[in-house]
Amino acid sequence: MEMSDANQETLDKWLKSARRMDSQALSKLCAHYYPKILRFMRYRVGSNLAEDLTGEVIVKIMRSIENQSGRFEPWLYRMARNVIIDHVRYRSVRPETELSEEMSNNLINEKSPDTAVSHHMDIQTALGQVSDEHREFLSLKFIQGLDNHEISEITGQNLNAIRAMQFRALKAMRDVLAPEGVET
Amino acid sequence: MKNIETILDECIDQLRAGSRMDEVLKKHPDVEDELRSLLGVSQGLQALPDPTPSVECLMRAMSQQITQPARVQERRQAKIPFFSRPALLRFAAGITVFFFLGWSTVAASSDAVPGNFMYPVKRFAEKMHLIFSVNDKDEAELRITFSERRLAEALKTYQQGGGINDGLLRQMLEESKQALNQALALSPEERSYLLSRVGYLTAHQQNVLEAVKRTADPKEQADLEPISELSGRRMQWMGQMMKDEKMTPPSCSGCWGASPEAQQNDENKNTEPPKTIEQWMDSCPM
């Protein structure tokens, strides 16, 4: 469900007002980006944690929007990324462990004869089994739909490194989905 | 020669731009199989379903952060006091009101006027309504309602001996202007309906302001004069715009349309009247 269907011009207007701590613009901005952050979190840490960590990102936005400069979305994803890093450090738990367990449960409990659903589950399961670094890249590029320049702004990697990471991450996914020469 | 990483990246860009998989692969026969499997994975990732967030989900997340600060916030509290920023304070106060006092509190605030301790609750509830309005028409309708409320509040304040609250009256005009702004994005039928509503609202507000002016003391009349004059110009402007949109302005004691003096001034200025509703909005008296 899209909570807000604002165009770029409206978003820029909200952002400008939110930077001046206009509470209404800030609320609208948070409501607009909430589904995007939730989606990012959902495929990074699993649905059990996604809502909590998305809430943390929202509070961080509210606290630091005053000093925000530059493009908003990369800033937002850097913040979301830091929340995940903080979470991992705090719990000393690798997020992929939680994700894999949750996704395995999904597969056990929600098996469906529908091919598309099964395919989604395969992809989700595979995503839970690749390294955190690969999952982060795959989430940003393919699930969030960002381009290489935006990812570069978020991760600090140069474009060559991003292309190499893209190849390795997709290859890792493919190997999980069809190991040892199994046809995809 | 390009390496596989670069070729893969170019293929992904081409697919995103709308090219078909076969067309993209045809250009790279040497690595076609490798590319096909990797691009297949990328498309599978892009097709993953969205989680389904809800308003309740967002509100719950926010209220949890405010009422049960998580560990990250606790660590940060030492650096930045939680309630140190006005916007955060207002936001937190609002969320708290919604969840701990409930909607009954918001309903109880409906008659509140500035100075009343429930008034911030009323205004916050309005903001929340706006945030979760589902479309432009919904928002325009809300703006009209809020404009009516500002007038009612100004009247109540005046009747209670609080004098002319020009802040409320200016907000009244601002809300109706916002309603017009929202109307621009709507279909012609919906736009006409909303323009008509704002037209009648403006006429009503002007009539009320004139009635108040007749009974007010000289000081209050002086306070009211700039708003009344602004509202009058707004009404003339609305009347012209509605005629331009081929709508019938509401009759209002002959108050629609420019006064003879204003018409004379306009002729002297030799200015072109606005041709589109967007141009009309740019010329809205504020």
Image (cartoon, coloured by chain):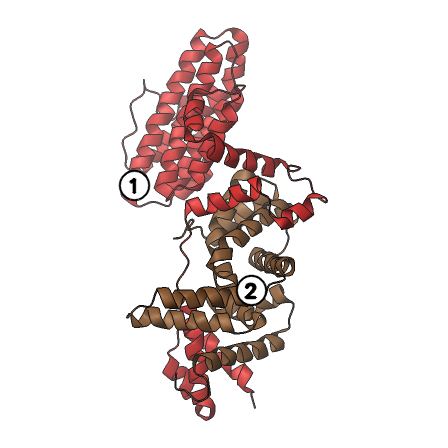
Chain colours: A brown, B red
Q: Which residue is mark 2?
A: A95
Q: Which residue is mark 1?
A: B190
Q: Which residue is situated farthest in the bottom direction here?
A: B30
Residue at (52, 12) in percent of width and height: B163
Instruction: Judge the density around disc 2: few (<14), some (14-19), many (≥20) Cα neighbours within 10 Å.
Output: many
Residue at (52, 74) in percent of width and height: A130
Looking at the picture, does residue B65 appear above or below residue B259?
A: below
Closer to the camera, A94 or B250? A94
Q: Position of residue B38 (x, y in %)?
A: 46, 81
Secondary structure at numbered mark 2: helix
The kind of residue on which mark 1 rests is Glu
Left or right position of B65 against A101: right
Closer to the camera, B150 or B188? B150
Q: Position of residue B213 (x, y in %)?
A: 45, 12
Q: Gap between marks 1 and 2, in whole Å?
A: 50 Å
Left or right position of B91 against A5: right
Residue B269 visible within the image: no
**Disc 2: which chain?**
A
Left or right position of B89 against B40: right
Looking at the picture, does residue A157 appear above or below residue B69?
A: below
Q: Quadrant of residue B18?
A: bottom left
